[in-house]
Image: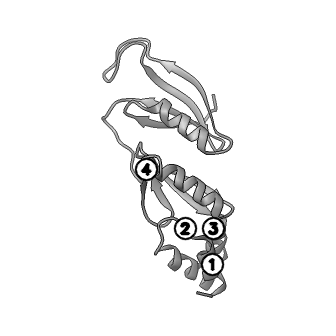
Amino acid sequence: MAKNTICLWYDKDAEAAARFYAATFPDSAVGAVHRAPSDYPSGKAGDILMVEFTVAGVACIGLNGGPAFTHNEAFSFQIVTDDQEETDRYWNAIVGNGGQESACGWCKDKWGVSWQITPRVLMEAMAAGGAEAKRAFDAMMNMKKIDVAAIAAARRGAG
């Protein structure tokens, strides 16, 4: 187990979420599945309690803690993509499997975990600063899923 691990609280679907992430993102996998040794407030002995997994190389634990807490946008995974095809693939996997679109490259999976599907061209524009960053930022503000070609055009001052 990694020294620093992100713990994500799920009602009861930690294993399903972990398996979805592992099937969707490279360098992702499901590790150990731990069962509750005794009854607990949201479950019974033998229920899946924790799932160890990685998402794009980041160590995580999914905890089936019950309905007391839900995910919100204060936490998100940011997945940097290289082109429109990769952006579309991740966006469509999340949104197309019970997720929800948001704005500016953000979406939520069906468990309520927020994702930023962020093309590298947008990150590079923001890092460039100045007028180039402003044009790319202004273009992004009108998008749900990021349009790589539109961001590239905005960086150049076209469009």
Q: Residues within 10 Å of mark 2 (few under 14, many from 20)?
A: many
Q: Residues within 10 Å of mark 1 (few under 14, many from 20)?
A: few
Q: Amino acid at mark 2?
A: Ile
Q: Residues within 10 Å of mark 4 (few under 14, many from 20)?
A: some
> Taking 131 as reference, is 105 left or right?
left
Question: Which residue bears the numbered disc 2?
Answer: 146
Residue drawn 37% across and 33% down?
A: 11
Q: Nearer the viewer, mark 3 or mark 1?
A: 3
Q: Specify which label sits upstream in the sequence, 1 or 4.
A: 4
Locate residue 42, reporting x and y percent: 32, 24
Label 3, label 2: how many angstroms apart (C-alpha)? Answer: 12 Å
Residue situated in front as seen by the camera: 92 or 111: 92
Label 4, label 3: how many angstroms apart (C-alpha)? Answer: 24 Å
Residue situated in front as seen by the camera: 40 or 98: 98
Q: Specify which label sits upstream in the sequence, 2 or 1.
A: 1
Q: Amino acid at mark 4?
A: Gly
Q: Specify which label sits upstream in the sequence, 4 or 3.
A: 4
Residue situated in front as seen by the camera: 20 or 11: 20
Q: Amino acid at mark 1?
A: Gly
| Disc 1 and disc 4 in contact, CB within 8 angstroms | no
Q: Can you tell which mark lies on residue 129? A: 1
> Taking 146 as reference, is 99 left or right?
left
In the rendered image, the quadrant that contains the C terminus is bottom right
Q: Specify which label sits upstream in the sequence, 2 or 4.
A: 4
Locate residue 83, reporting x and y percent: 67, 64
Label 3, label 1: how many angstroms apart (C-alpha)? Answer: 10 Å
Residue drawn 45% across and 23% down?
A: 49
Residue drawn 34% across and 30% down?
A: 66
Q: How many marks?
A: 4
Locate residue 85, reporting x and y percent: 65, 61
